[in-house]
Amino acid sequence: MLIGSSSSYAYGSMLERHRVVIEKHEVQLALGEHAPSKLRAVSLTDFHFDPLYETDYINECVRQANALNPDVVLLTGDYISNTSDRMNDLAEALGGLRAKVGIYASLGNHDFWDDPLRVRKALISKGVEVLMNEHTRVVCGDGELIIAGLNSVWSGRPNWDRVASGLKANERALVLVHEPDFADQLAYDERAVMQFSGHTHGGQVRLPLLGALRLPSFGKNYEAGFYDVKKLKLHVNRGIGTVHYHVRFFCPPEIACFDISNTDIA
């Protein structure tokens, strides 16, 4: 039993933790008649760059994301774990991301627990637009895309009412919010058409039949993958990094790629 446990730990820590998987999805969304007819979005989340500082691994994830040729890249928080001291190093690596339209980010609970302004400043310096209870409008293909970002539920006071005050009743937004369980609140407003989240790491360690052994606060209702929460589409990304125990088991890191079609345009 000890040998088996040791072997499983070695696999989870040395192999699966860096065996990033690209998950491709075709998604149909009612984005509104003025939104693009189609677009490709790539999401990455939960880098937890310290204390391991695995720059080579992050660079490889950036390379794989770029190879997908996205229109937009969406980052949904927890760039750090305990300290933002090396945030500039992570931002340097993430500065290598390329997208036709732009790179957009929200912050996670770990970012707020240390120094959210420092994290935000580092990302902005490398061309990432960080959305903190706000939205942006960008020209994407043949239409206008609205992307909103909310602060962390756990530690950053998300304010959807503030974001939504700038949206018309017939407009629809893609929403970045670190913790997936916020979908239960967001689903009541049809202007939020899809929520992109991380936070759970998919449980990080999963066992057959049992599933995730541990899930964080505000990430207990939705573990990983796609969910329909009323009319809201929710995707929970398993993330790039690890926290607490640097192990993944039956839960590889993820880069998610979405080919989105706008059903409001014939």
Image (cartoon, grey):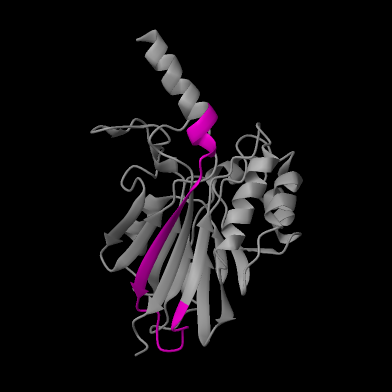
Work out whether residue 100 or residue 115 is closer to the camera in this orientation and state it.
Answer: 100
Q: Quadrant of residue 252?
A: top left
- Height in image: 128 above or below 236? below
Q: Would you say residue 230 sits in the magenta stretch?
A: no
Residue 19 position within the rendered picture, expressed as x and y whole percent measured from the top left: 51, 40
Could you say where residue 111 lies in the image, as x and y percent from the top left?
61, 45
Q: Nearer the viewer, residue 194 or 158?
A: 194
The residue shown at (54%, 28%) is 14
Residue 221 in view, yes or no: yes
As drawn, which residue projects farthest toward the left? 209
In the picture, residue 264 is in which quadrant? bottom left
Q: Position of residue 104 (x, y in %)?
A: 59, 64
Near-viewer residue (74 or 38): 38
Residue drawn at point x = 46 percent, y = 49 percent: 198
Write the residue at 63% across / 48% down: 60
Q: Any magenta on residue 37?
A: yes
Residue 244, can we see it?
no
Image: magenta residue range: 14-38
How many numbered dots are placed on residues in this image? Answer: 0
Image height of 185 relative to 53, above or below: below
**Which percent across, then down, holds residue 212?**
33, 35
Against 28, is 48 above or below? above
Quarter of the image with the N terminus in it: top left
The residue sitting at 38% across, 44% down in the picture is 219
In the rendered image, the quadrant that contains the C terminus is bottom left
Q: Is residue 33 found left or right of 129 in the rendered image?
A: left
Please say if 53 is above or below 230: above
